[in-house]
Amino acid sequence: MTTSNRILLGVNIDHVATLRQARGTRYPDPVKAALDAEEAGADGITVHLREDRRHIQERDVLLLKDVLQTRMNFEMGVTEEMMAFAERIRPAHICLVPETRQELTTEGGLDVAGQEARIKAAVDRLAKIGCEVSLFIDADERQIEASKRVGAPAIELHTGRYADAETPASVAEELKRVADGVAFGLTQGLIVNAGHGLHYHNVEAVAAIKGINELNIGHALVAHALFVGFKSAVAEMKALILAAAAKA
Ligand SMILES: CC(=O)[C@@H](O)[C@H](O)COP(=O)(O)O
Ligand SMILES: NCC(=O)COP(=O)(O)O
């Protein structure tokens, strides 16, 4: 069981690409953002190639594969198109996520328990090309147990409900749900990551949960970068989470 306070920061650059796609320009380039993030202390770079290509494009993923000094965490839906693309580019890490074309953002976790055979086939297929697969799931024991059964070495707990909670009681309840999920995941021998909707004002409590391997953060970093620059935004976030983890 991992109980060290070392916690990694995966920087999600999707929404740098959102700004580029809004006008169909060549800027801002998410590849430049990734390199700046690495210089500022990112431990990895996360990208989500959505079926509708609303932000990240194949071009971004192919370039990142060649230039990253850290590692790519490639988020994808479980579709034949994405499986074939992953086999072509062979990222070090793949996170399987649920995807609905019309959603504003990833609304819930992958229902691993409800489709074990399909997810196991995907995990097995990706393991054959050397990818470490994680499953983006809700902090729910049933989903965590199913993730273990399908052979995924890692899970990423969806922190969106915590981020969206509005009252002190619901924030505390959602934080506890995440903390319990982390503890349960560790008892199952899984690597436990977390992310979604984390920002400068809510990240510390999550970073203080013992045993989390990595936090994946994107939207808030890109938003803050408008005012302070990408490197400073990443460095500030990294300092916050390391300080919170060290204090815990
Ligand atoms: C899976 C996840 O939580 C994020 O990567 C998120 O999908 C970012 O992209 P969207 O904001 O397009 O959902
Ligand atoms: N998997 C979560 C992620 O990569 C970042 O999500 P967000 O910070 O953009 O909400």
Image (spheres, rainbow, N blue to C red):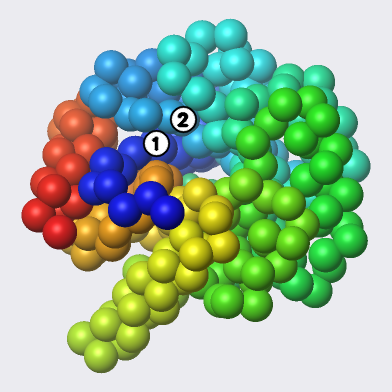
Instruction: Tell me the number on the disc at residue 83.
Output: none
**Nearest the camera: 242 or 128?**
128
Element type where label 2 sits in the image:
strand
Q: In this view, does 114 lie to the left or right of 49?
A: right
Q: Is label 2 within 8 A of ligand 2 (CB to nearest ligand atom)?
A: no
Q: Residue furthest bottom?
A: 169
**Nearest the camera: 114 or 51?**
114
Cβ atoms under marks 1 and 2 closer than 8 Å: yes
- Badge 2 is on which residue? 45
- Badge 1 is on which residue? 11
Q: Where is residue 178 in the image (x, y as percent from the top left)?
A: 40, 71
Q: Residue furthest top?
A: 66
Element type where label 1 sits in the image:
strand
Q: Which residue is drawn at 34% across and 21% down?
A: 38
Residue 69 visible at all? yes
Q: In which quarter of the image is residue 109?
A: bottom right
Q: In which quarter of the image is the N terminus?
A: bottom left
Q: Residue at x 54, y 27 (%)?
A: 72
Q: Position of residue 143 (x, y in %)?
A: 65, 71
Q: Quadrant of residue 132?
A: top right
Q: In this view, does 51 lie above or below 211?
A: above
Q: Is label 1 within 8 A of ligand 2 (CB to nearest ligand atom)?
A: no
Q: Quadrant of the C terminus?
A: bottom left
Q: Position of residue 83 (x, y in %)?
A: 83, 37
Q: Which residue is drawn at 15% across and 53% down?
A: 244
Q: In this view, does 2 lie to the left or right of 18?
A: left
- How crowded pointer 1 is (Cα within 10 Å; few <14, some 14-19, many 20+) is rated as many
Q: Where is residue 216 in the image (x, y as percent from the top left)?
A: 42, 46
Label 1, label 2: how far apart the Cα atoms are? 5 Å
**Nearest the camera: 199 or 194?**
194
